Image (tube, rainbow, N blue to C red):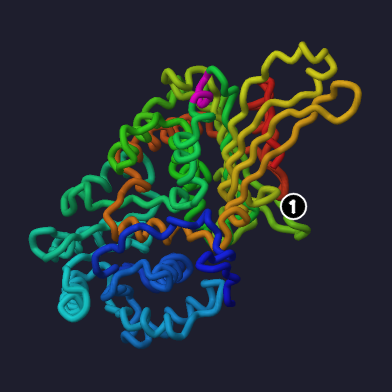
């Protein structure tokens, strides 16, 4: 559509988007997706790479190699990728863009457990580098089940594919969650990675950290002089972090029986959000400076003194049959691959404290669950109430606390609730809201989280990726809860699908005279 112009000024342009495309292009390289026939690759990785290519954010010669057990040729792999884009992209595929993108797609069939297959992969990468890339740069993305991590990493190392000395250019490896199944498992995985890769080559990905509002937390705090001065225990009453899903476990029953909500969501996504909200300002917006401060926060989270403390500050639930979005759904124990007497939790709520100067005494309430009333992720900072008796006791009773809410999904944005006088001759106080929405303010489509993180990987920017000390600090907390549950033979409290979790969750706040926000 032709834009309206006045002289040389484009009146249809959105000035808020100016400067949004100033990131440098990464150097040419090859991304190898191990597990290219899987769900993650088809739903997230391939569409994200296509969008980056379409936006001109990938360099000439950039190539993608799929590696999986399927006996596909290069053309067959391209046909699979095209079908994936048609299904998951959410918009028509440009034929012109597709031709350019498809020319950089290649496939190497192989069994993850067979070392010989990695030799074939090495040969293909060398040919592509000689004919297209010419830098030797490569990124290995582990889109494979965690149970195969050990053999895949060892084979990459033994064949020299991850070596900075044996092959030209730089090599990086991206590891998806779950990063270990407990603290000991995380340490073992770290030791395995360090056997073949340097720490600066390792990118532990958490896609939540690629979402626009998550990235905006630090900008919002530190680029606005009116917020950082009140971002502490003197002004903040408490913080609520909610990651709610309306879906059940779908076909992931086997995985969920092993993980549960605590390990699946709290250990990574939710604690990462807490770290970004609570961290100190870094000395510079550089990868290690940011990750230093995040790790400090997670290490400062107060540990549970004993099993009774866990029982008091942690609530667990399991969804039963109910109604979600007007549709009757079955309970967790009726899901495929779930034991009929399962005691796996599908909901967890915690009350945590960060024992440092900024947050001493401020409770952080965290909750996540499946089959809740709606899909929403939100961080809410509720501020302390000022003394309002100057307006009379009635006005004071009508007022509500100021709340700053950051909506991560859906409809990313930020809202601020504050009190205002109701028009009229008497003093009546009523809460009002100021709203900011990314979609309406900036226009256009927000980049998918994986787009940002994949581009960061190719640029060598680890700011939004987890470091080993932060991962282990999160696991230390989760392990304490799980040990207490095992000791007490904990059985999650049942809650109906379509609600907001078990009653015990509300009691975590009620004991402190607070309540969960209505979302």
Q: Is residue 21 above or below residue 63?
A: above
Please state which of residues 357 and 110 is positioned toward the viewer in this rendering. Answer: 357
Magenta stretch, overall SS: loop
Which percent across, then down, holds residue 167?
11, 65
Q: Residue at x 61, y 25 (%)?
A: 383
Which percent across, then down, holds residue 161?
17, 65
Q: Quadrant of residue 435?
A: top right
Q: Is residue 232 visible?
A: yes
Q: Is residue 380 above or below residue 104?
A: above
Q: Residue at x 44, y 44 (%)?
A: 268
Q: Is residue 38 visible?
A: no
On screen, residue 357 versus residue 119, left or right, reads: right
Please state which of residues 57 and 85 is positioned toward the viewer in this rendering. Answer: 57
On screen, residue 108 versus residue 89, left or right, reads: left
The residue most toward the right is 425
What is the tally of numbered marks visible in this picture?
1
On screen, residue 379 versus residue 128, left or right, reads: right
Report the quarter where the N terminus lies. bottom right
Dot 1: element: strand
Q: Residue at x 44, y 40 (%)?
A: 272
Please state which of residues 317 and 425 is positioned toward the viewer in this rendering. Answer: 425
Which percent across, then down, holds residue 337?
54, 59
The residue most toward the front is 7
Report the quarter where the C terminus lies. top right
Residue 49 magenta-highlighted: no
Please state which of residues 487 and 12 is positioned toward the viewer in this rendering. Answer: 12
Q: Residues within 10 Å of mark 1 (few under 14, many from 20)?
A: some
Q: Residue at x 76, y 24 (%)?
A: 399
Which percent across, then down, holds residue 280?
40, 29
Residue carrying label 1: 322
What is the magenta range? 229-233
């Amino acid at each position: 559509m032709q834009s309206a112009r006045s002289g040389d000024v484009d009146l249809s342009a959105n000035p808020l988007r100016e400067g949004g495309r100033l990131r440098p292009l990464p150097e040419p390289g090859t991304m190898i997706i191990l597990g290219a026939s899987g769900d993650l690759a088809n739903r997230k990785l391939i569409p994200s790479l296509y969008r980056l290519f379409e936006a001109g954010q990938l360099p000439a010669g950039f190539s993608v190699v799929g590696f999986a057990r399927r006996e596909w040729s290069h053309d067959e792999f391209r046909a699979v990728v095209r079908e994936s884009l048609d299904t998951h992209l959410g918009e028509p595929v440009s034929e012109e863009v597709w031709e350019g993108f498809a020319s950089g797609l290649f496939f190497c069939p192989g069994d993850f457990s067979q070392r010989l297959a990695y030799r074939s992969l090495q040969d293909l990468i060398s040919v592509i580098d000689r004919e297209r890339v010419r830098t030797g740069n490569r990124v290995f993305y582990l889109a494979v089940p965690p149970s195969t991590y050990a053999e895949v990493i060892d084979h990459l190392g033994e064949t020299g594919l991850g070596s900075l000395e044996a092959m030209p250019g730089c090599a990086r490896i991206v590891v998806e969650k779950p990063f270990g199944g407990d603290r000991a498992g995380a340490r073992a995985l770290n030791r395995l990675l360090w056997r073949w890769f340097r720490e600066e080559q390792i990118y532990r990905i958490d896609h939540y950290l690629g979402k626009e509002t998550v990235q905006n937390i630090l900008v919002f705090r530190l680029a606005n002089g009116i917020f950082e001065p009140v971002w502490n225990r003197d002004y903040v009453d408490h913080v609520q972090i909610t990651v709610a899903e309306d879906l059940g476990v779908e076909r992931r029953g086997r995985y969920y029986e092993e993980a549960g909500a605590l390990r699946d969501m709290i250990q990574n996504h939710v604690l990462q959000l807490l770290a970004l909200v609570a961290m100190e300002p870094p000395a510079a917006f550089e990868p290690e400076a940011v990750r230093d401060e995040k790790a400090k926060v997670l290490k400062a989270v107060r540990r549970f003194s004993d099993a009774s403390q866990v029982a008091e500050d942690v609530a667990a639930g399991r969804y039963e049959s109910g109604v979600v979005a007007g549709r009757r759904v079955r309970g967790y124990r009726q899901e495929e691959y779930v034991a009929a007497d399962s005691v796996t939790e599908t909901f967890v709520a915690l009350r945590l404290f960060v024992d440092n100067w900024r947050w001493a005494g401020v409770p952080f309430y965290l909750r996540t669950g499946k089959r809740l009333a709606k899909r929403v992720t939100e961080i809410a900072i509720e501020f302390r109430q000022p003394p309002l008796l100057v307006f009379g006791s009635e006005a004071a009773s009508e007022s509500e606390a100021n709340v700053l809410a950051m909506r991560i999904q859906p409809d990313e944005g930020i809202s601020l609730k504050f009190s205002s006088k109701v028009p009229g001759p008497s003093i009546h106080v009523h809460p009002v809201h100021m709203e900011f929405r990314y979609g309406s303010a900036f226009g256009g489509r927000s980049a998918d989280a994986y787009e940002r993180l994949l581009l960061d990987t190719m640029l060598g920017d680890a700011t939004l990726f987890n470091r080993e000390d932060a991962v282990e600090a999160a696991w230390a907390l989760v392990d304490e809860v799980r040990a207490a549950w095992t000791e007490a033979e904990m059985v999650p409290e049942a809650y109906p699908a379509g609600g907001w979790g078990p009653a015990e969750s509300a009691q975590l706040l009620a004991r402190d005279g607070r309540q969960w926000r209505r979302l």
